[in-house]
Image (cartoon, rainbow, N blue to C red):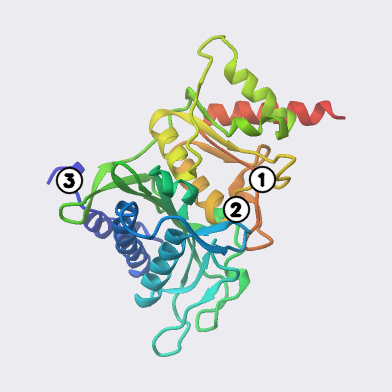
Amino acid sequence: MEERNKTLGEFIIENQNAFQYSSGELSRIINSIRLAAKVVNYKVNKAGLVDIVGAAGEQNIQGEDQQKLDVYANEVFIQTLINREIVCGIASEENDDFITVEGSDNSHNNKYVVLMDPLDGSSNIDVNVSVGTIFSVYRRVTPIGTPVTIEDFLQPGINQVAAGYVIYGTSTMLVYTTGHGVNGFTLNPAIGTFYLSHPNMQFSKDGSIYSINEGNYIHFPQGVKDYIKYCQTEEEDRPYTSRYIGSLVSDIHRNMIKGGIYIYPTSSKAPNGKLRLLYECNPMAFIVEQAGGKASDGFSRIMEITPTELHQRVPFFCGSYNMVEKAEDFMLKAKLSKY
């Protein structure tokens, strides 16, 4: 069988030995996410036909309106992981607190916790623009046999053992890493199977796309304003192209394939940034770094930040290595010019 035709299931089995510590659980977690993704994909693809678009009338812990499909995706991923009895805890962007998962025998012997954003970019659902799922897997730090605690979830991103995303777009793709590069699998909807379509995904060192919500320009820190002007200057290989979908998964996926930088900085409206460290930035940073890119908060590596709360927000710069380095240069110069 040619490499490009390998199924996700075959790929997982072949690479089982690459999972440190694991005796099958991590493979089963990826398989569970694959199953849940297919269920959510089915709903996403018929969202315009049924009463599952629009707001659910409630807000999540972030104070944002929950979309009906958000709630559905959250339930599907949580229940799929619980039913398989392979994780000891789950944290979701949609839930106030983490979920402790017991085995059927009331044990707490599973080794892994999953953190997730079940439906990223949900404000785009009603207008038929790509949305996605982001997930992150850690090995628990509390003793096996005891219930999980907050300590199991507040780990720096460098401790991740797997991370990935599903993009529900013109085609549905599952992209993930276990620390041995990044591979993308495309769903064949006719038979419900993911096939390896994008082996060894890599960011180019340089790119020509910058992705940022320029409508918030006036609220950005000076370093970001300076970098945007640099991107727009007609010089050398610039001006760069501005592309911003407003769906983190979609923007980063495009930039990984095309070459570019994604920025969601602090602003006077969001002084800590808007994206969540645990559910969005850490998993994306792991993927980006494994694909040869760079991910930072504008000054330092995202995956070295020690989290202090489940729903912590941070500024986020990620993408082609040299582009992120240049943006960091502008941030540092602006910071130093204040003193």
Foreground disc of the pair 1, 2: 1
In the rendered image, the residue lying farthest to the left is 1
Residue 270, given in percent of the width and then of the height, sits at: 70, 45
Q: Which residue is mark 2?
A: 277
Residue at 72 percent across and 43 percent down: it is: 269
Q: What secondary structure is marked by label 1?
A: loop
Q: Which residue is mark 1?
A: 273
Q: Earlier in the sequence, mark 3 or mark 1?
A: 3
Q: What secondary structure is marked by label 2?
A: helix
Q: Tell me the crowding category of disc 2: few under 14, some 14 to 19, or many 20 or more residues within 10 angstroms, Cα based.
A: many
Left or right, 48 with reference to 310 = left
Three-letter amino acid code at the position of disc 1? Gly
Q: Nearer the viewer, residue 256 or 54?
A: 54
- The CA span between labels 3 and 1 is 40 Å
Q: Tell me the crowding category of disc 1: few under 14, some 14 to 19, or many 20 or more residues within 10 angstroms, Cα based.
A: some
- The CA span between labels 3 and 2 is 35 Å
- The CA span between labels 1 and 2 is 10 Å
Q: Is residue 164 above or below residue 199?
A: below
Residue at 53 percent across and 9 percent down: it is: 236
